[in-house]
């Protein structure tokens, strides 16, 4: 995965201190594969998906957006808001599999019960999701 990323982008990872701050501020434990990816990627546009910055110094970041959505709709505390796309939201469940869930924004309050009207896209873990968006980026660059 690192090699695939390196072909497309410059390495732009974050330190364990940043990851520890995300865990502390959100009161969660980040999955190991998320930590691994963050050693070379810190958020931003990949495969047409604008992933929230992992750096809390950036205006739109994982901590701020997760806390905002938690407050606005009562997002359960085990979820981290990864990205917000056109009328949809991508979250990471830090305790259960599948870990990455891309659902319609209006169904965000149904995350706990997972009683969705529209079936969300899911990935078993962050690595699977990240590989998916890297594949999208490779396809996009072919044209």
Image: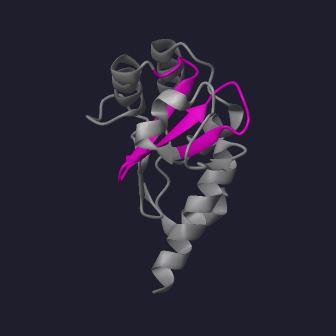
Query: x, y (%) of residue 105?
Result: 41, 41
- Determine the image quadrant of residue 59: top left
Query: x, y (%) of residue 12?
Result: 46, 48
Quadrant location of the N terminus in the rendered image: bottom right
Residue 57 in view, yes or no: yes
Give left or right: position of 125 versus 48.
right
Residue 14 against residue 46 in the figure, above or below: above
Residue range corresponding to the magenta coloring: 75-102
Query: x, y (%) of residue 90?
Result: 49, 43
- Residue at the extreme front of the image, as rendered: 117
Q: Please tell me which residue is depicted at 58% across the width and 17% down the height of the picture.
A: 28
Quadrant location of the C terminus in the rendered image: bottom left
Residue 15 in view, yes or no: no
- Determine the image quadrant of residue 89: top left
Asked if the magenta segment contains residue 111, the reply would be no
Give left or right: position of 129 versus 104.
right
């Amino acid at each position: 995965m690192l090699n695939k990323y390196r072909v497309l982008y410059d390495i732009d990872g974050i330190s364990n201190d940043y990851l520890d701050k995300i865990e502390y501020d959100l009161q969660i434990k980040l999955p190991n594969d998320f930590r691994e990816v963050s050693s070379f990627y810190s958020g931003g546009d990949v495969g047409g998906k604008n992933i929230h910055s992992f750096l809390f110094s950036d205006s739109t970041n994982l901590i701020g957006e997760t806390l905002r959505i938690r407050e606005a709709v009562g997002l359960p505390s085990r979820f981290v808001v990864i990205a917000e796309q056109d009328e949809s939201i991508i979250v990471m469940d830090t305790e259960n599999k599948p870990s990455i869930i891309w659902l319609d924004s209006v169904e965000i309050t149904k995350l706990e019960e997972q009683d969705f009207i529209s079936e969300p896209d899911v990935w078993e873990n962050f690595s699977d999701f990240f590989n998916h968006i890297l594949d999208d980026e490779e396809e996009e660059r072919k044209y």
